[in-house]
Each structure stands twice: as C-alpha cells, then as structure tokens.
Image (cartoon, helix red, strand yellow):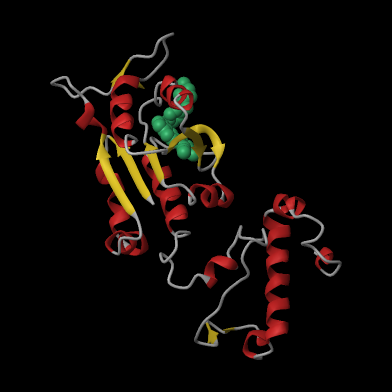
C-alpha cells in the first residue's frame, strides 16, 4: 500500500518514522510519503489560504493549490482521498479495515477553517473514492493528528506489520465487537493486588469464558451502544446476564 500525507506542517507526521509504522516503511511493507502542501504553491509567499466567501471568521484553504498537489499524487492510479474534518463520518475500526484494502490513500490535512468544499466535490466527480472522516466529537486545530490516528489504525492491519497476526483477532472493537478484557503480567502480586486465580489455572476454557465475561461486563458498563449493535448470534443466553 502507498500512503501520501499532505500538510503545511509535515514535521507533525514525524511520529510515523517510529515504532511499528517506521519499521514497516523500512521493511518495504508500506510506502508512506509525507509532503509539504506549500511545495505546490506558485507565489513568492507560498500562499495556501484566503478569506471565506460569505464572510465569517478565519481563513479557508485554497482549492487550486490542493488540486495541484492531489492531481500529482494520484497520477499513477486510483487513489482513495481521505479528508479529516470535524464534520466527517466517524472513523471506526470498520473504516480502518475498509481503507486497509486500498492500493493508495491520500490524506489531505487541512488547517484554518478547513479546505474549500470543491476539492472533495471535484475528486468525487473525477471518479475517486473520497472519505471525509472525523476521529471523534472534539475539536482539533487541523487534520494532522487525525491522520496520525487513521494511518496507524490502517497500517497495523497490513500483512506483516504486526508481528503476531493473532493479536488482531481478539482486539477491542474487533470481530466480537466488545471492549477488551483486563490483562495482567508478572509479578503475581503487586501493591497487595493479586492476579485473578483463573488466569493462573491453566484451564483454557475457563480462561476464555472469564475473559469473555469481563469483556461483556466492561462493554455493558462503558459502551452499551456496542452491545445493542451485536447481532443475536453473537450473544448467547449466558452473555445476556450482563
Ligand atoms: C465558525 N466555526 C465554524 C465551524 N468550525 C469548525 C472547525 C473547523 C476547522 C477546525 C480546524 N481544522 C482544520 C482542518 C481540520 C481537520 C480535522 C479537524 C478535526 N477536529 N476534530 C476532529 N475529530 C477532526 C478530525 N478528523 C479539525 C480541523 C476546527 C473546527 C469552527 C469555526
């Protein structure tokens, strides 16, 4: 997969040189390129914004500069344009799974009051998939942090990026749709707190049941919406006790 990220603060994306995503890039598992939007400006001040039509506070990012950038970056084939925005569809694990199937993603990191609406409109009309996505109901100053979140969530789903693919199976918001159960490691007693006996029992069926029960308990308490979204086949009668 190729991922292009365009921003006026490319250094914000330096975190993608680190850890698993950084290793995946070095290993050739992920072709990730970060670009400075100002490289596509043509004026001496390298201007990327202007005042909003219709008035109002703040500045809006110009469509012409974005158009030059996205045209160049999508010239080699069908790319999925991702535009982080506070008004976007909520980004979820399902969204990450869908994006992970694409050949190329282009993230357009807006700033100011956002990107001229014609940019998304233009690329939809040109036949590109365009997703305007939000990572949550809070206000950020731009699209860079959201792009970091989405790129990490997508990259870890790519073959070979996570050392143990097994760990992708049981994850929170994973296939079972439940929050994750509590995890423990050595020492067996810490701060006068003990590890639950069942986890030391070696009885794998009981351990699986205990973990599912804790996941159901936590999900019922913190995210009843996820319980409601589970289809009947996922929950057996034992599960409904929570
Ligand atoms: C008068 N009012 C009219 C409404 N605006 C709304 C507004 C518009 C832009 C910005 C700043 N910004 C610029 C680009 C950009 C991309 C993503 C996000 C973002 N925030 N939160 C998420 N989950 C995000 C994601 N993903 C924020 C961004 C903040 C607030 C305020 C002023």
Percent x, y of residue 40: 22, 28
Percent x, y of residue 129: 49, 34
In the image, 171: left or right of 43? right
Q: Which of these two is toward me, 82 or 224? A: 82
> Residue 3, can we see it?
yes
Residue 29, image quadrant? bottom left
Q: Is residue 140 above or below residue 164?
A: above
Residue at 36 percent of width and 27 percent of height:
112
Q: Residue furthest top?
A: 54
> Residue 62, can we see it?
no
Residue at 47 percent of width and 54 percent of height:
153
Q: Residue furthest right?
A: 237
Residue at 73 percent of width and 71 percent of height:
213
Percent x, y of residue 101: 49, 50
Q: Which of these two is toward me, 96 or 149? A: 96
On the rendered image, what quadrant is the C terminus found in?
bottom right
Q: Which of these two is toward me, 27 or 238? A: 27
Ligand 1 image-quadrant field: top left
Percent x, y of residue 42: 18, 21
Q: Is residue 226 above or below residue 62?
A: below
Q: Residue furthest bottom?
A: 201
Q: Is residue 14 above or below residue 184?
A: above
Q: Which of these two is toward me, 239 or 188? A: 239
Q: Is residue 34 above or below residue 166?
A: above
């Amino acid at each position: 997969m190729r991922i292009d990220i365009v921003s006026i603060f490319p250094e914000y994306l330096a975190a993608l040189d680190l850890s698993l995503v950084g290793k995946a890039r070095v290993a050739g598992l992920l072709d990730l390129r970060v670009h400075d939007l100002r490289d596509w400006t043509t004026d001496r001040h390298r201007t990327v914004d202007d005042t909003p039509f219709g008035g109002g506070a703040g500045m809006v990012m110009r469509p012409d500069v974005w158009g030059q950038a996205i045209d160049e970056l999508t010239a080699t084939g069908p790319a999925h344009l991702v535009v982080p925005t506070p008004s976007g569809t909520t980004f979820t694990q399902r969204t990450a799974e869908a994006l992970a199937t694409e050949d190329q993603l282009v993230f357009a990191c807006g700033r100011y009051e956002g990107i001229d609406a014609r940019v998304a409109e233009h690329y939809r009309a040109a036949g590109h998939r365009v997703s305007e996505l939000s990572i949550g109901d809070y206000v950020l100053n731009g699209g860079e942090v959201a792009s970091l979140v989405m790129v990490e969530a997508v990259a870890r789903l790519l073959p070979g990026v996570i050392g143990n693919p097994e760990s992708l199976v049981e994850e929170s918001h994973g296939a079972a749709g439940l929050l994750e159960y509590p995890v423990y490691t050595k020492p067996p007693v810490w701060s006068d707190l003990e590890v639950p006996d069942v986890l030391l029992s070696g009885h794998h069926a009981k351990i699986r049941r205990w973990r599912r029960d804790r996941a159901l308990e936590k999900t019922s308490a913190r995210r009843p919406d996820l319980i409601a979204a589970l289809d009947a086949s996922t929950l057996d009668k034992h599960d409904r006790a929570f």
